[in-house]
Image: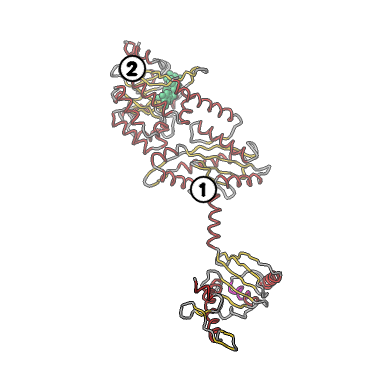
Amino acid sequence: MHTQKKISKTPYYNGDGKLRPLPKVKRNGTSVVPMMYVQDNLDKENFQLRETLNNMMHGVVMFDSKGRIVVCNNRYIEMYELSEELVKPGCTLLNLMKHRKATGYFAGDVRKYCKQIFDTIKRGQASSHHITTTDGRTINIVHNPLASGGWVVTHEDVTWQKQAEAQIVHMAHHDILTDLPNRALFATQLKQALRWVTREEQLAVLFVDLDNFKSINDTLGHPIGDELLKIVADRLRCCIRETDIVARLGGDEFVVVQTKVEQPSDVAVLATRIREAIMAPYDILEHQIIIDTSIGIALSPNDGTDSEQLIRNADMALYGAKASGRGTYRFFEPGMDEKMSARRVLEIDLRKAIVNGEFEVCYQPLVNLERDEISCCEALLRWDHPERGPIAPATFIPVAEESGLIARIGEWVIRTACMDAASWPDEVTLAVNVSPAQFRNQNLVQVVINALSASGLPARRLEIEITEAILMEQTETTLVTLNQLHALGVRIAMDDFGTGYSSLSYLQKFSFDKIKIDSSFINGLSDCEESTAVVRAVAGLAESFHMVTTAEGVETKEQLEIVRALGCTEMQGFLFSAGCSAADIMKMLHQVGKRLAS
Ligand code: C2E
Ligand code: MG
Ligand code: MG
């Protein structure tokens, strides 16, 4: 420190690497530094300056007041691939810019540009601007005037920063997983699109929600769920036209805006195309996945002219699509609002019902048509609402499924029914309905095991009724659960057969113990040849697979005789008995009256 302070006031020489005051000699009574040392020192300073300039990341050029290069570093030459012969001290700005234009690194008017620079420098003003080179780099150029009348220009390659900035802006507006526009960008895009809506053309907002996506995440894991979402995004992109919009609002919610809609049927066509695209099988990490989708549609201007209202109404229509059994599309209708709030009220009441114990299980007997004896009783849930009175399962089960409450309710049904059935005669089995939502819940097998062990009911006396919807959703994991239940000794019945999609194909996927033919076919037996053909075919098929065939909803003797003649081996229906309380079924089972024929 001490030495530095001392030499900072005097010229110094550091030729040997050490800082020390320059040697001085006495001349005419004053001490001066000899010229040889001064020259030597200047050379060294020039050298250091050049080294510094040439090692800078920026391109630097210094001009004198006449616009001639005083100094210019290598970086500048490299940046624009300039000729070292031409670009050197003395070269004028005009010639330099002409050269840059010739090498393709300047696109503007050379004279105009030079004049602009001179004018700014004359005013003593600093200036900066960006240029994009032909090879796609972004250069930030800053002109700084000097006291001498000249100026210094720095050229900084900011390509990387610009790319990073652009990336940040992109990320703020796009969903990272699918790279689709996010909610924020979508809102802006929709507003813009709405401005273009004309008298002749409408605009449609389609809310697309994957059915039961959560269960894929839960059962197969998030990486597979993520992969699925990416593929869904790609498929959606392929469904739309250039002027349309597709965005991801979060989770498994996507939105499509269809522009230039002439009539609602245009939207129906797109909705169908979207559903078909999403329903095509996915092959992800050796998992075959099939997923359906529900779509809610709102049209502008009819269902709203501003983006908020359209989004709200499309969402409401989506809710309607989900409520009507998923896997479908629905257009917004004015009454949907009230329906939705009624559903919400029902959901609140269902929660209360669980706590207050408002549920009861009743049992409907099924009769074996070979022995004419009760072979099984189906547990049917009953809800006696404190104000509204009895509410049908068809009304509240879908709400319970959608809200997830079915898991708790269903578990209660299985436990209660197993307890009741444990005291029935040994040859009578118990059938319990299990909804898709319960199947998605990983612990169904455990719930069954617990119910069986708590009640002491042998597994062979329990029958689980499932619908085709369960097999539709997730064949792979569903089959695992079904096989686990089978392994316990539990029997599996396919309920409401014929109301689903490609019914027969499901029969090959799993060896069901029973097929219950939906009551709609039984209803049609007397006057519909098709129904008769279906019942006969199913009964024949079931026989060859050693399955029981149950005719559901048998109400008349005529129907009974027909189903018997067609080969059904079991019947269920009001003709024999409707659902009864646990106490009544107990009485029925223990009296001789359990026989059908009378
Ligand atoms: P399901 O499993 O097909 O049950 C048979 C339905 O048909 C019952 O209606 C029963 O009362 C009715 N039924 C029986 N015989 C006749 C007849 O001769 N004529 C007519 N018209 N109907 C007859 P319910 O009790 O209203 O149940 C409706 C549906 O609700 C059930 O259809 C089942 O899918 C569901 N469900 C009922 N209880 C439960 C439950 O505990 N859990 C689940 N997940 N679903 C349940
Ligand atoms: Mg059933
Ligand atoms: Mg049924």
Answer with left or right where residue 578 lies relative to residue 317. left
Mark 1 falls on what kind of element? Answer: loop
Give the quarter the ligand 2 occupies: top left
Magenta stretch: dominant secondary structure: helix
Answer with left or right where residue 71 lies relative to residue 211. right
Residue 524 can be seen in this image? no
Q: Position of residue 233 (x, y in %)?
A: 49, 47
Image-quadrant location for residue 452: top left
Q: Position of residue 150 (x, y in %)?
A: 66, 74
Query: Magenta region: which residues?
Result: 97-104
Residue holding disc 2: 374
Query: Label 2 crowding class (10 Å Cα cut-off): few <14, some 14-19, many 20+?
Result: many
Q: Is residue 543 magenta?
A: no
Residue 175: numbered disc: 1
Q: Is residue 185 above or below residue 138?
A: above
Q: Is residue 86 above or below residue 546?
A: below
Q: Alpha carbon of mark 2 to alpha carbon of mark 1: how far?
A: 58 Å
| Mark found first going from the N terminus, 2 or 1 | 1
Residue at the image position 49 percent from the left and 77 percent from the top: 19
State yes or no: Cβ of the residue under disc 2 lies below 8 Å from any atom of ligand 1.
no
Q: Position of residue 268 (x, y in %)?
A: 56, 39
Residue at the image position 36 percent from the left and 46 percent from the top: 286
